[in-house]
Image: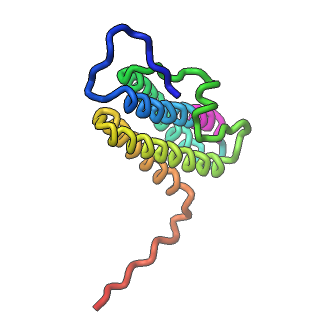
Amino acid sequence: MAKKSKSKLQINIGIGEKDRAAIAQGLSKLLADTYTLYLTTHNFHWNVTGPMFNTLHLMFMTQYTEQWTALDSIAERIRALGFPAPGSYSQYAKLTSISEETGVPSAREMIEQLVTGQETVARTARAAFKVADAGDDQPSADLLTQRMEIHEKNAWMLRSLLEDGTSSPPAKKSKK
């Protein structure tokens, strides 16, 4: 659980301390998931091989660069709520929902793992959004909405690389 920072001046932003603590905890989980996904994506950027090398190398770089930037926004929101942002590997290991990859999987397995990771971060953001919304914390809710949108789009783009391109969903028959 996030611990309150020690300051003589009380935070009075219109969100009670209990709600701020719950929101900071959700954001801390999001920070840990985002950092773990960032490391995985950067690892795969360095180690991808195969016929899709250039496409994946560039896509992974775009994604990990965006994730790196997001880390700062998430951590700063935790701080604005009056709590320290987790910042160590051991803290992230306790908070994350994403499994660490220690080997070098195939390009297809990398894509599959990143789809799972992107969806995990989206679910973590969605869970934290509910807490932020219930606590009337619009800035955190806005940040979380942006994170969900980005991770859902990334999951879709990665998933599309796994399709063979020969089939599409069946068209619905109209009722007369």
Q: Which residue is at 59% across, 32% downward?
A: 39
Dominant secondary structure (helix, strand or loop) of the stretch shown in magenta: helix
Left or right of 31 in this view: 51: right
Q: Which residue is at 46% across, 72% downward?
A: 169
Please, is residue 10 above or below residue 99 in the view?
above
Total marks placed = 0
Q: Nearer the viewer, residue 31 or 175?
A: 31
The residue lying furthest to the bottom in this view is: 176
Look at the image and give the residue range highlighted in magenta. 39-48
Please, is residue 58 above or below residue 123 in the view?
above
In magenta segment, residue 41: yes
Q: Nearer the viewer, residue 120 or 67?
A: 120
The residue lying furthest to the right in this view is: 103
Please, is residue 38 above or below residue 109 in the view?
above
Left or right of 161 in this view: 128: left
| Residue 34, position as x, y percentages in the image | 51, 34
| Residue 62, position as x, y percentages in the image | 46, 36
Q: Which residue is at 61% across, 47% downward?
A: 113
| Residue 73, position as x, y percentages in the image | 39, 27
In magenta segment, residue 22: no
Where is residue 92, by image quadrant? Answer: top right
| Residue 133, position as x, y percentages in the image | 33, 41
